[in-house]
Image: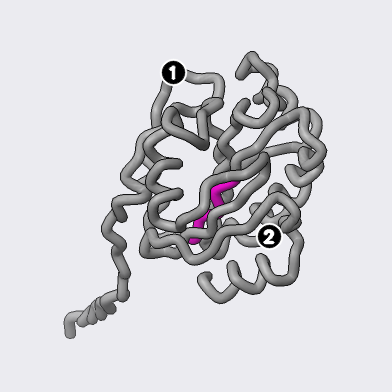
Amino acid sequence: MKNLIVLTLSVLSVTTFACSDILNSTLRILDSDAEQNLCEYSGNVILVVNVASKCGYTYQYEGLQALYDNYKDKGLVVVGIPSRDFLGQELADESDVKEFCSTEYGVTFPMFATTKVRGKKAHPFYKKLRKESGVQPSWNFNKYLISKDGSIVSTYGKNVEPNSPGLISDIEKLL
């Protein structure tokens, strides 16, 4: 008598997300010549933050890293974008920015090149964020929360801490 092997295949449900116009933006990776299209984060909840190393809010890096550590496995991506738009509070050399973020705050979330985030010379990504949300950064550590489908859900000013119950609640609802 021959052995009969039965193989059962199950189909997993996979949700795919098209890249939204907002995310269809390319940024240069911090201290690198490499570029990355933000479409790579489609299907994730994204918190975009314009950051600076010499600002009164720089301590928020610690909270941003904790937020990323707590929720990255559930689909949160924190995106840091250094800017010198506000009193030049970002270090001039990107290698210094990278070293500062790594050494002082253990930053492992994606960091991109120093970029203009407001005004006529703002990076096209920030122009899209402003157009869609009606809000442009008024200072360092402004935040944009983007849903899995690539739409802006909310914006938060510099005073909203990364561990703010409201921000965390909004993120958890989207995850």
| Residues drawn in magenta | 45-49
Instruction: Determine whether 17 is above or below 130 in the image.
Output: below
Magenta stretch: helix, strand or loop mostly: strand
Q: Is residue 57 left or right of residue 126?
A: right
Q: Which residue is mark 1?
A: 33
Residue type (three-letter) at the residue carrying disc 1? Asp
Q: Quick one: which residue is furthest to the bottom in this view?
A: 1
Q: Residues within 10 Å of mark 2 (few under 14, many from 20)?
A: few
- Quadrant location of residue 88? top right
Q: Quick one: which residue is furthest to the left in this view?
A: 1
Residue mark closest to the camera, 1 vs 2: 1
Instruction: Determine whether 111 is above or below 18 in the image.
Output: above
Pinpoint residue 133: horizontal percent, then vertical percent.
Answer: 45, 58
Q: Residues within 10 Å of mark 1 (few under 14, many from 20)?
A: few
Pinpoint residue 167: horizontal percent, then vertical percent.
Answer: 66, 66
Q: Is residue 142 left or right of residue 46?
A: right
Task: Calculate the distance from the C-alpha at mark 1 to the C-alpha at mark 2.
Answer: 30 Å
- Residue at (56% x, 36% y) in the render: 81
Pinpoint residue 134: horizontal percent, then vertical percent.
Answer: 46, 56
- Residue at (67% x, 40% y) in the render: 140
Q: Earlier in the sequence, mark 1 or mark 2?
A: 1
Pinpoint residue 86: horizontal percent, then vertical percent.
Answer: 66, 31
Q: Secondary structure at mark 2?
A: helix
- Residue at (29% x, 51% y) in the render: 21
Viewer-proximal residue among 153 and 19: 153
Where residue 70 is drawn, which disc sits there? 2
